[in-house]
Amino acid sequence: MTSNPKAGDGSADEPVGGAALGAGPPHDPPETEAERRTRRAVFLRELAEARELRERVQPRRTKERRMREAMRMRTFRI
């Protein structure tokens, strides 16, 4: 069976599909704390923008969601 040069001996310990060869993302240099904070700030800004847009587009659903959330919060208060 030499038609598949990457075939193993069928051991259960061996990863399926050659996952060990191409596992994970390419090795980039680790990002700095400043880059991570910048990327996080952009993400949070876009998330807030998406929430605002959703509230404008679906005001009734948003109101219902807020009311359900308030009811849920009241349920857990002691």
Image (cartoon, helix red, strand yellow):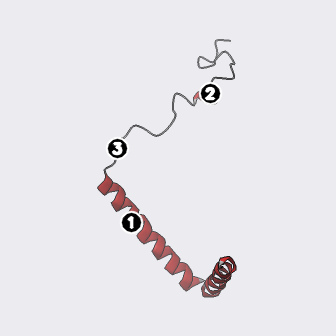
Q: Is residue 44 left or right of residue 70?
A: left
Mark 3: few/some/many CA within 10 Å (<14, 14-19, 20+): few
Residue that appears at 59% across and 16% down = 5
* Front residue of 74 and 31: 74
Q: Amino acid at mark 3?
A: Pro
What quarter of the picture does the C terminus occupy? Answer: bottom right
Element type at mark 2: loop
Element type at mark 1: helix
Look at mark 3 in the image and give the residue it sits on: 30
Of mark 2 and mark 3, the one earlier in the sequence is 2
Marks 1 and 2, how far apart at CA? 37 Å
Look at mark 2 in the image and give the residue it sits on: 15
Residue that appears at 60% across and 87% down = 59
Q: Amino acid at mark 2?
A: Pro
Q: Which mark is residue 42?
A: 1
Marks 2 and 3, how far apart at CA? 27 Å
Q: Mark 3 near mark 1, Cβ–Cβ under 8 Å?
A: no
Residue 64 vertical placement versus 3 (above, below): below
Of mark 1 and mark 2, the one earlier in the sequence is 2
Of mark 3 and mark 1, the one earlier in the sequence is 3
What quarter of the picture does the N terminus occupy? Answer: top right
Q: Amino acid at mark 1?
A: Val
